């Protein structure tokens, strides 16, 4: 069995090709074994079979049977897609006698999601956070991990509204220069400032209209709040108790979760 994690965006990589993600304790577990004919048991078997095919080609394995269990709400901006791909690459590598380290498995996952048209940039920021935990910084265009930091001890409240995901790559790319600056800010350790500015800009670019919820989180003590990934989920980071905000969210349609950053993996 192999495990990878979901995460929340500090800097979305779609605008500038560079991104940063903090891993959180929403896990994906993948179990795989060689079998006569490839089969998958998951919420999207076609995707999992396509990933398994990429993994077995790269590692020289036979057909794979794969089971996926995930606690990450899919399609919400919490990196479910990269976490599934990363856990599957880690598990395939284990079957091949631990051929890859965790970083190599994340790169294999990013190459696979790009090849399958399931990510825009390869999302190496998402895949490295899924594999390594902590806060990762990546250049997705050159498929390179720039740095990994230990995540501070904070509480993260995730709100997943019941609205559809929207992705408009052309609009997101208008933020290129702005996001290059946010990446520099995050690399200087100003994670929460970068996360707040990222989340508000992505909300405006994609037209979710969720900024009032981010402002409410700030007024209730959050140090950062905003859209994660391409949404629609909104993550808010608290150094102190998030109880007031969690109670307030209870009145809205959608689901709210309290999670923690993950530093220890594997
Ligand atoms: N448990 C799972 N089993 C199989 N496939 C999954 C699972 N969870 C997610 N996926 C795949 O990932 C897709 C969601 O990926 P998508 O990129 O839309 O969202 P995300 O990764 O949550 O968001 P973001 O990239 O903005 O963080 C699902 O439609 C499905 O194909
Ligand atoms: O598809 C992609 O390339 C990405 C999707 C989102 O998760 C982003 O947050 C990530 O930085 C890149």
Image (cartoon, rainbow, N blue to C red):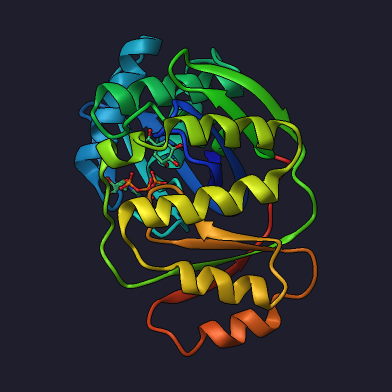
Q: Residue at x 63, y 20 (%)?
A: 146
**Residue 89 in picture, x, y percent from top left:** 45, 27
Q: Quadrant of ligand 2?
A: top left
User: Exactly how many numbered labels are in the figure?
Assistant: 0
The C terminus sits in image quarter: top right
219 displayed left or right of 203 = right
**Residue 162 in picture, x, y percent from top left:** 32, 72
Residue 132 appears in the rendering: no
Q: Residue at x 25, y 63 (%)?
A: 164
**Residue 172 in picture, x, y percent from top left:** 34, 40
Q: Residue at x 65, y 70 (%)?
A: 218
75 displayed left or right of 186 = left
Considering depth in this image, is 141 or 122 the residue closer to the camera? Answer: 141
The outermost residue toward the bottom is 251
Q: Residue at x 40, y 12 (%)?
A: 59
**Residue 96 in picture, x, y percent from top left:** 48, 16
Residue 157 appears in the rendering: yes
Depicted 62 relative to depicted 52: above or below = above
Considering depth in this image, is 235 or 225 the residue closer to the camera? Answer: 225
93 displayed left or right of 75 = right
Considering depth in this image, is 151 or 179 the residue closer to the camera? Answer: 179
Image quadrant assignment for residue 65 = top left
Image quadrant assignment for residue 34 = top left
Depicted 200 relative to depicted 148: above or below = below
């Amino acid at each position: 069995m192999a495990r990878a994690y979901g995460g929340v965006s500090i800097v979305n990589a779609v605008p500038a090709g560079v991104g940063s993600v903090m891993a959180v304790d929403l896990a994906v577990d993948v179990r795989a074994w060689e079998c006569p004919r490839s089969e998958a048991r998951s919420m999207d078997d076609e995707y999992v079979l396509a990933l398994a095919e990429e993994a077995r080609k790269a590692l020289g394995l036979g057909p794979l049977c794969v089971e996926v269990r995930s606690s990450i709400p899919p399609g919400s901006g919490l990196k479910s897609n990269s976490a599934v791909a990363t856990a599957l690459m880690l598990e395939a590598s284990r079957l091949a006698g631990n051929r890859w380290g965790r970083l190599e498995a994340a790169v294999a996952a990013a190459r696979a999601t790009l090849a399958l048209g399931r990510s825009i940039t390869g999302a190496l920021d998402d895949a490295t956070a899924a594999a390594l935990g902590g806060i990762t910084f990546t250049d997705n265009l050159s498929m390179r991990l720039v740095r990994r930091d230990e995540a501070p001890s904070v509480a993260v409240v995730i709100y997943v509204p019941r609205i559809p995901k929207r992705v408009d790559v052309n609009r997101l790319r208008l933020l290129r220069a702005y996001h290059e600056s946010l990446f520099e800010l995050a690399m200087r350790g100003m994670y929460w400032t970068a996360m707040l500015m990222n989340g508000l800009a992505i909300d405006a670019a994609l037209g979710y209209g969720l900024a009032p919820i981010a402002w409410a989180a700030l007024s209730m003590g959050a140090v950062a709040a905003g859209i994660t990934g391409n949404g629609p989920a909104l993550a808010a980071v608290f150094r102190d108790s998030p109880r007031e905000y969690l109670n307030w969210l209870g009145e809205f349609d959608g689901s709210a979760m309290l999670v923690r950053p993950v530093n220890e993996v594997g």
